[in-house]
Image: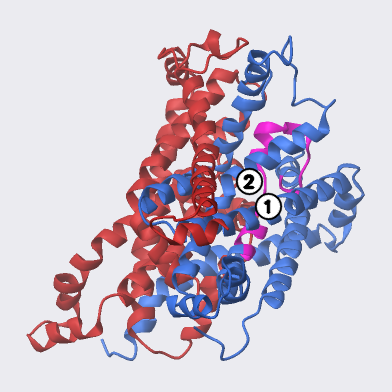
Chain colours: A blue, B red
Amino acid sequence: MSPRLLPYFLILPVTLFLFLFFLYPFVLVAQQAFNSSSGFTLNNFRDVTTHWKFPISLRNTFLLALAVVPIQLALSLLMATMVNRMKRGRDLILYVWTIPLGISDLAAGIIWLAIFEQSGFLNSMMGGLGLIDSPTNFLSYQSPVLVFVAIMLAEIWRATAIMLVILVAGIGLIPKEYYEAGEVFGASAWQRFLRITLPMLRPSLQTALVLRVILAFEVFAVVQALGGTLFPVLMGETYAYQFELLNGGAAAAIALIILGISITFTLIIMRALRVPKGATI
Amino acid sequence: MTAVATDVAAPGTDSRKAGQYVYIAGVVLLCAWVLVPLYFLLINTLSSPETVNTFPKRFVPEFDMGSLSFFAGFDGILTALKNSILVAGLTMIMSIAIGAPAGYALSRFDFWGKELFRLLILLTRAFPLPLLALPLAVMFIRAGIDDTVFGLALVHTTLAIPFAVLITFSLFSGIPMELEEAAWTLGCTRLTAFTKVILPLVLPGITASAIFAFVISWNEVFAAAVLTIENRTLTAFLLQNLDTSPLHLKFAGGFILVVPALIFIFAVRKYLFAMWGIANR
């Protein structure tokens, strides 16, 4: 085969695959959401958004993202700088810290259920310390704040690793000379972090935040395992429409809303953290 | 503060020493944050069903196989486990077979539309992909592959392909073009140069990215729950029975979900960073 055609031949399978299973389904989901037996309709959107659960699940999804992502950003930056100056045991510590990367959100929810359920380890610990006499049910409708905290902790536990990996890789690309120069001119460690690490890390921060924020709006299994119906989120509503109410049009409508939110936030993050043209390491 | 102290091998002053201790304490604390919840899950899994449901809990496992044998005997769970393995295996094969050629094309050729192709790949990461399971459910019914292992594997491959392409791209980019050219001058064709020289060098990395694809599929919950009814995967099965299943079944199931992930992340740890480092810009 001629060298000019070979690359096209090699990328053809992926391109076909993504057109069929990535781009085309977007058309389908829009069709599903806007179509009815009598042509174009906004009924699905009206039904979905006027349902009493919609504002609650929208608020919950945003609150969770707002509570979780900044903490994860700070935590992953801290962990990445800690790893970066590590001399011995770096590989082992990194392995331990990235373990949650391989753990499914459902499993993460179940893991934190072991801690928060009524006969769970948090109750046992508090009982052992003599703080309580009988176990309390943390995950009930009477304590919505605790349900939220449990889900938040599970999300932070599970999904900080993905940001850590990206940031550690990004920090590794920053030339050591910059830090040496900073030290020569008397910059403190904090100043070096602010003036060298953070600006140079911008592309990685962008990637990490985009990935993480999209995952945050997709939150589903962790919530199902810990809160069930106590803490409705958008993705859970999609699932409920599809399965319990067997309303594919409504499910597609919520899916489009989630999609819209994700795209909006991706664009905001890309814009806020854009790398100036020509400024590369 | 802490940062300055840790840069020096032999801390001189007290404040440096204190900083060193804070640093080490931080690392230990963060390791505990990751490991302790996993340990709790282990205790629950290795306890009898009665112990799992009693209060207070002991903080050492009693090494009783009751929960695990209950899990193995639960109706339908072994089929679900088999389905999970099948789907993940298929995903692994398809994403590498389709993705690796594209990764090679990106690393070796300059061709018209290359940037557009890269954009298509990167675009997939800016969307909540599991949502596409909704329209695909309709499409699969028409195609007659609804509720099959193969249909779900197609969706999981869509999730895994961007990673497969980017990882293999960075792997092939790490091998000097000159090596391939030398093989050509020594009488290899493009194909034999690839199979005899390049492939042995990238095989460990390809294996790692295959394992990564396996884990992505193994952990996926939403699409699996939407697309399978009779042939549920383990995650879908556990999710659907969250309301009704007893605690010991959930914990044993969570444990079975976690174990392969632990091993896999250990196996790919060497490549985790290299692949992100190049892949994220």
Spot occupied by residue B126 in the image (x, y as percentages of width and height): 62, 66
Q: Tell me what residue is drawn at x 30 percent, y 61 percent.
A: B205
**Left or right side of A243 for B209:** left
Front of the two marks 1 and 2: 1
Q: Secondary structure at mark 1?
A: helix
Please state, as top left, top right, bottom left or bottom right, where the N terminus of chain A lies in the image.
bottom left
- Res B98 visible: yes
Q: Nearer the viewer, residue A185 or B276?
A: A185
Residues at marks 1 and 2, CA–CA distance in whole angstroms = 8 Å
Letter of the chain that mark 2 sits on in the rendering: A
> Which residue occupies 56% across, 66% down?
A189
Q: Nearer the viewer, residue B115 or B147?
A: B115
Residue A71 is tagged as 1
**Relative image position of residue A46 (x, y in whole percent):** 90, 55
For the record, the magenta segment spans A209-235
Q: Mark 1: which amino acid?
A: Ile
Q: Are marks 1 and 2 in contact (CB under 8 Å)?
A: yes
Disc marking residue A156: 2
Q: Where residue A39 appears, x then y in whole percent?
A: 83, 64
Give me the residue at 56% from left, 91% from top: A278
